[in-house]
Image (cartoon, helix red, strand yellow):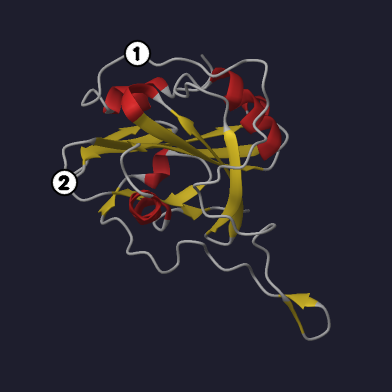
């Protein structure tokens, strides 16, 4: 399998169980009503003589996760961190970590990147591939509003996953480089709690947008 999302499931051996793929025949298109619903793309307003303001980072006000990983292992990434006390995973082109909530439920994240022929032409194409082949979702992906991380827009999708978990995917794709961040969080979390777990990690991500 081209994408090494299996390691995300491995990080949640805390979890157990077997991953199942989503429906191969459905493209991700439905918006998740339980997720934050900001209208349109998160671009900035214009100032002066038509000069656009840089888009505001979605997670700018979130306290970043404190455990820094070796971002030099992943193409296109300058910094990345995970939660305090999480068990880290650091391999070429993939970083991640897993831990548990106060209630003992598993939380995990992986970040990976692909260049050249392994990178699809845009985020929409990457999401279509994920919808069919991610190995974690148990239903078709639902597209959420995009986010801005380190000044870069990332597409976002969500689905139910194994063992009463939720999987969230974040994709930045230029046609030459794809950066993918994937989270598993408990379905029992409310939206604010889920966003806090995700935001702490996403607030650490620095992208080399050369």
Q: Secondary structure at mark 1?
A: loop
Name the residue located 31 percent from the left edge and 46 percent from the top edge.
Answer: 69
Identify which residue, 87 or 165, lies in the foreground. 165
Q: Residue furthest front?
A: 33
**Residue 176 seen in the figure:** no
Q: Is residue 126 left or right of residue 200?
A: right
Could you classify mark 1 by the number of other residues whose Cα lies within 10 Å: few (under 14), some (14-19), or many (20 or more)? few
* 43 to 207, vertically: above or below: below
> x and y percent of residue 131 in the render?
59, 25
Q: Which mark is residue 208?
A: none
Q: How many discs mark residues in the rendered view?
A: 2
Residue located farthest toward the right when viewing the structure as drawn: 49
Residue 68, position in %: x, y?
Answer: 29, 51
Residue pushed farthest bottom?
48
Identify the residue at horizontal 16%, vertical 42% (top origin).
Answer: 103
* Residue 100 drawn above or below residue 60: above
Seen from the viewer's position, the closer of residues 175 and 167 is 167
Question: Marks 1 and 2: in contact by CB < 8 Å?
Answer: no
Front-most of residues 159 and 88: 159
- Expressed as whole percent of the image width and height from the top left, the position of residue 45 reads 71, 74
11 lies above or below 30: above
**Residue at x 70%, y 57% (from the top left corner):** 40
> Based on the displayed image, in which of its 4 quarters is residue 156 positioned?
top right
Residue annotated with mark 2? 102
Residue tagged 1: 18
Residue 118: x percent and y percent?
Answer: 62, 25
Secondary structure at numbered mark 2: loop
Which one is earlier in the sequence, the residue at label 2 or at label 1? 1
Distance, label 2 to label 1, CA atoms, is 24 Å
């Amino acid at each position: 399998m081209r994408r090494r999302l299996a390691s995300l499931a491995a990080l949640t051996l805390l979890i157990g169980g077997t991953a199942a793929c989503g429906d191969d025949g459905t493209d991700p298109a439905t918006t998740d009503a339980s997720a934050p619903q900001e209208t349109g793309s998160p671009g900035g307003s214009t100032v002066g003589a038509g000069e656009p303001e840089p888009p505001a980072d979605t997670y700018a006000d979130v306290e970043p996760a404190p455990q820094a990983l070796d971002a030099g292992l992943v193409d296109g990434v300058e910094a990345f961190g995970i939660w305090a006390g999480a068990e880290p995973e650091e391999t070429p082109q993939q970083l991640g970590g897993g831990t548990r909530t106060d209630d003992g439920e598993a939380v995990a994240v992986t970040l990976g990147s692909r260049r050249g022929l392994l990178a699809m032409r845009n985020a929409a194409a990457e999401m279509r591939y994920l919808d069919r082949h991610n190995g974690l979702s148990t239903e078709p992906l639902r597209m959420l509003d995009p986010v801005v991380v380190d000044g870069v827009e990332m597409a976002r999708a969500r689905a139910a996953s194994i063992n009463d978990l939720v999987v969230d995917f974040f994709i930045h794709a230029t046609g030459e480089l794809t950066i993918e961040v994937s989270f598993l969080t408990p379905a029992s979390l409310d939206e604010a709690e889920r966003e806090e777990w995700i935001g702490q990690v996403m607030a650490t991500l620095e992208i080399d947008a050369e």
